[in-house]
Amino acid sequence: HRFLRHVERTKLILHLVDVSSLSGRDPISDYKIINQELSKYDANLGARPQIVVATKIDALDEPERLEALKKRAKRDKKQFFAISAVSNVGVKELVNAVSAALDAEKEAEAEKALELAREERGEDVTSVSP
């Protein structure tokens, strides 16, 4: 739970999932278990924006493992990226997506703060445009 308390402070979750068969693990099962644990710990944490990242694609010998995770992420309406840190495949695109997601989150927070300030001043926030 110590780790989950740390995760509570994050604005965006990067959910890295090893899709190589070298780990001997099922990527879909790992993905579901982590998301269940997040939601069980705190429903808001489970609903936090999340990008699913398939890792170790350089060691991918069963492409269906990658496709299954991609389908699951799409079904869950989450952005999906496949990367290899070893060969640097997909890393730049992931970094750009993270940057864009954090910028959007920052903008949404600023708009919310502005709306709260207007409400505190008694302004009609429904008719005021940013």
Image: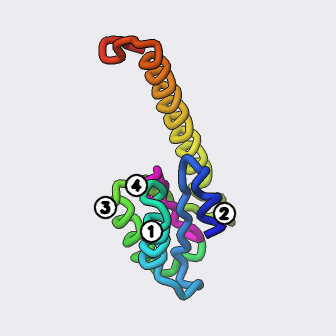
Question: Crowding at label 2, few (<14), some or many (≥20) Cα neighbours within 10 Å?
Answer: few
Q: Secondary structure at mark 1?
A: helix
Write the residue at 44% across / 68% down. 40
- Find residue 40 and name its label: 1
Tag 1–tag 4 contact (CB < 8 Å): no
Q: Which residue is mark 2?
A: 85
Q: Secondary structure at mark 3?
A: helix
Q: Amino acid at mark 4?
A: Lys
Q: Secondary structure at mark 4?
A: loop
- Residue 64's place in the image compared with 54, above or below, is below
Q: Which residue is mark 3?
A: 75
Q: Amino acid at mark 2?
A: Ala
Give coordinates of residue 28: x percent, y percent: 42, 75
Query: Which stretch did the figure color magenta?
Result: 46-57
Q: Amino acid at mark 1?
A: Lys
- C-alpha distance separating marks 3 and 1: 20 Å
